[in-house]
Image (tube, rainbow, N blue to C red):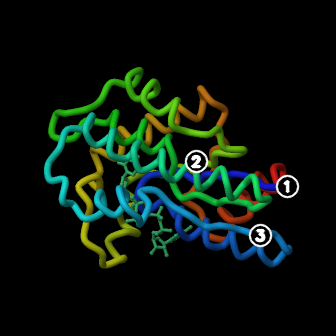
Amino acid sequence: MGAFIVLEGIDGSGKSTACARVADELRSRGLDVILTAEPTHDGIGAFIRSGNAGKVSQRAESLLFTADRYEHTSEIRRQVSEGRVVVCDRYYPSTVAYQSAKLDGDSADLGWLKGLCEPFTDEPDAVILLDMDPEESMGRVEGRGLEESKFENIAFLRQVRSAYLDLAREFGYSVVDASRSADEVFRDVMTIIQEVV
Ligand code: ADP
Ligand code: TYD
């Protein structure tokens, strides 16, 4: 039976690391696993990643991420219906948490964001929030050597973290303390995933 699993968290919280380990572990148990991420690397996702949209408002940004998700969701749905386990690094909670936070004084309204995302998303079987302090997570990312995204600053990420925690309370996401070792985080994430695969 297929399943749709989403990992969420601020930049540097260890999502990519945990997703890769989860995919390896599930494959070693004989499951057919698709590892994917948003923004995607195709079409609209690639356009977002290119930075060619320039400096746009948080509302316009939300529309771009949502358009990317709409295309991505039909592919996720197909994979799950064919019995695969889809592990997705970010999904609609990213849009609600990141685009509701203030960036240069601009943010999208929380109610508007939830209403926007709802018709264009499928309900994941599990949403796992890797929660940690942005100061620590940015310390990790600084060592990564990639160009810093406009969403990666501590004050901004504090708001994102708080929005994520509110969403977790409201919608019952699992919250994992991501400040611990990669092994400990992975163990907790697998415990949650075992309930849905
Ligand atoms: P994200 O995908 O959430 O941005 P990554 O998985 O890319 O985060 O991790 C960011 C950096 O932190 C990487 O260099 C990764 O190797 C490292 N890292 C991931 N998980 C941990 C952990 N639990 N403890 C310490 N470092 C970690
Ligand atoms: P990220 O997961 O960091 O991609 P990568 O690890 O491949 O660089 O995502 C890029 C940025 O996009 C990240 O700072 C979070 C942001 N983002 C949003 O602001 N809203 C969204 O809906 C999504 C999916 C991502």
Picture coordinates of residue 120 (x, y %)? 51, 36
Marks 2 and 3, how far apart at CA = 23 Å
Task: Give the structural element (helix, strand or loop) at label 1.
Answer: loop
Which quadrant, please, contains the N terminus? bottom right
Residue type, label 1: Met
Question: Which of marks 1 and 3 precedes in the sequence?
Answer: 1
Residue 135 vs residue 12, the one in the foreground: 12
Q: What residue sits right under mark 2 in the picture? A: 129
Residue at the spot of label 1: 1
Q: Is residue 158 above or below residue 59?
A: below
Q: Secondary structure at mark 2?
A: strand
Q: Nearer the viewer, mark 2 or mark 3?
A: 3
Mark sitting on residue 187: none
Nearer mark to the viewer, of 1 and 2 = 1
Find residue 63 and report its horizontal and vertical position in percent. Answer: 33, 39
Quick one: label 2 or label 3, which is nearer the N terminus?
Answer: 3
Q: Is residue 129 visible?
A: yes
Helix or strand or loop: what does disc 3 sit on? loop
Q: Residues within 10 Å of mark 3 (few under 14, many from 20)?
A: some
Above or below residue 146? Residue 122 is: above
**Left or right of 195: which side holds 11?**
left
Q: Which residue is mark 3?
A: 32
As measured in the structure, the alpha-carbon distance from the residue carrying label 3 to the one carrying label 1 is 10 Å
Q: Residue at x 69, y 58 (%)?
A: 79
